[in-house]
Image (cartoon, rainbow, N blue to C red):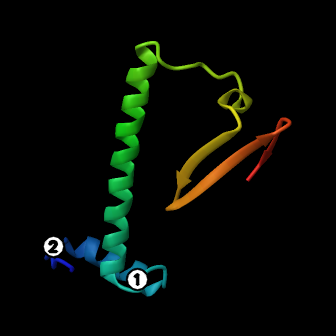
């Protein structure tokens, strides 16, 4: 189920939003706003994760890495709604 939200924009912001939609990157204003909200939520979740990691490291629970090889055999990270796995085999990184 969807919720309907009404927002108020300055004329300048509305003009820029219209321009972005017309350029074809987004099919509707709603799509743009949904994407923006998702990105901000992910940004906030990442920031919380970084703060938690920083606190753990300061508490002596972390390990200072000299290279990616020190991570073990696998690193998983997220970028632009996609999950990436880096695998280490004999010092070679494979995506």
Q: Residue at x 21, y 80 (%)?
A: 1
Q: Is residue 60 above or below residue 48?
A: above
Badge 1 crowding class, 10 Å Cα cut-off, few under 14, some 14 to 19, many 20 or more, is some
Residue on which the image places disc 1? 21
Q: Is residue 55 above or below residue 21?
A: above
Q: Residue at x 46, y 12 (%)?
A: 60
For residue 7, which numbered disc appears in the image?
2
Q: As drawn, is 87 to the left or to the right of 58?
A: right
Q: Residue furthest top?
A: 60
For residue 71, which numbered disc appears in the image?
none
Residue 44, position as x, y percentages in the image: 33, 47
Dot 1 or dot 2: first in sequence order is: 2
Q: Residue at x 26, y 77 (%)?
A: 14
For mark 2, give the secondary structure. loop
Instruction: Determine contact: label 1, label 2, CB under 8 Å.
Output: no
Q: In the image shown, does 75 or 18 lie closer to the viewer?
A: 75
Q: In the image shown, does 70 or 44 lie closer to the viewer?
A: 70
């Amino acid at each position: 189920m969807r919720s309907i939200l009404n927002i108020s924009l300055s004329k300048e912001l509305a003009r820029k939003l219209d321009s972005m939609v017309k350029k074809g990157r987004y099919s509707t204003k709603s799509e743009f706003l949904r994407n923006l909200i998702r990105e901000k939520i992910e940004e906030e979740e990442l920031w919380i994760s970084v703060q938690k990691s920083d606190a753990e490291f300061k508490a002596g629970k972390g390990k200072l890495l000299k290279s990616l090889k020190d991570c073990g055999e696998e690193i998983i990270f997220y970028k632009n709604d996609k999950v990436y796995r880096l695998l280490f085999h004999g010092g070679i990184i494979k995506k």
